[in-house]
Amino acid sequence: MSQLITVSALITGMVGACYAGTKMIAWLWKGLRQLFRLADALTGEPAGGGQPARPGFLDRMASIEQLLEHLAEAFEANVTRMDAIDARLTVVEQHLAPPPEGSSAQVSAH
């Protein structure tokens, strides 16, 4: 009888250890899969299997930098244009503004 209990305990322990080992392997596999996906996202993937190529992190950053440079150039051009418009508007305002009180231009108009 004690042998039966010992064998049952050993079998239960082995089944429990196998179950725990399986769970540990599944947990490690899930972590490794996520790590490989991160590595693929960072390095990019070539085209294949009917899928288009996916650029890596550095390629994406380079395209963002190029876009920002283009936007900065366009912004600078617009600032230059706005300065020119502001200068023209100032000239028009000065031309259209009434002369100050008591100036000779106002006295001669009467």
Image: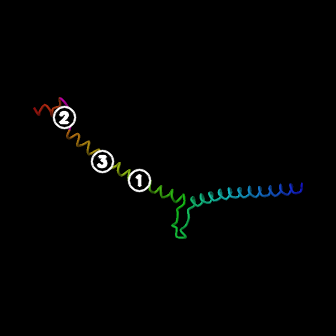
Secondary element under disc 2, as helix, strand or loop, is loop
Which residue lies under the disc numbered 3? 84
Query: Which of 24/51 is in front?
Result: 24
Residue 58, position as x, y percentages in the image: 54, 58
Mark 1 vs mark 3: in front: 1
Q: Residue furthest bottom?
A: 49
Q: Residue at x 38, y 50 (%)?
A: 76
Which residue lies under the disc numbered 1? 71
Residue 63 within the segment the image draws in magenta? no
Decide which of tag 2 and tag 1 comes sooner along the chain.
1
Q: Residue at x 19, y 30 (%)?
A: 101
* Few, some or many residues within 10 Å of mark 3 (<14, 14–19, 20+): few
Majority secondary structure of magenta residues? loop
Residue 99 within the segment the image draws in magenta? yes
Disc 2/disc 1 C-alpha distance (Å): 43 Å
Which residue lies under the disc numbered 2? 99
Query: Which of 61/93 is in front?
Result: 61
* Few, some or many residues within 10 Å of mark 1 (<14, 14–19, 20+): few
Q: Is residue 103 above or below residue 6?
A: above
Q: Amino acid at mark 1?
A: Leu
Judge from the rendering whether residue 16 lies leftward or rightward of residue 100; answer left or right.
Answer: right
Query: Which of 38/60 is in front?
Result: 38
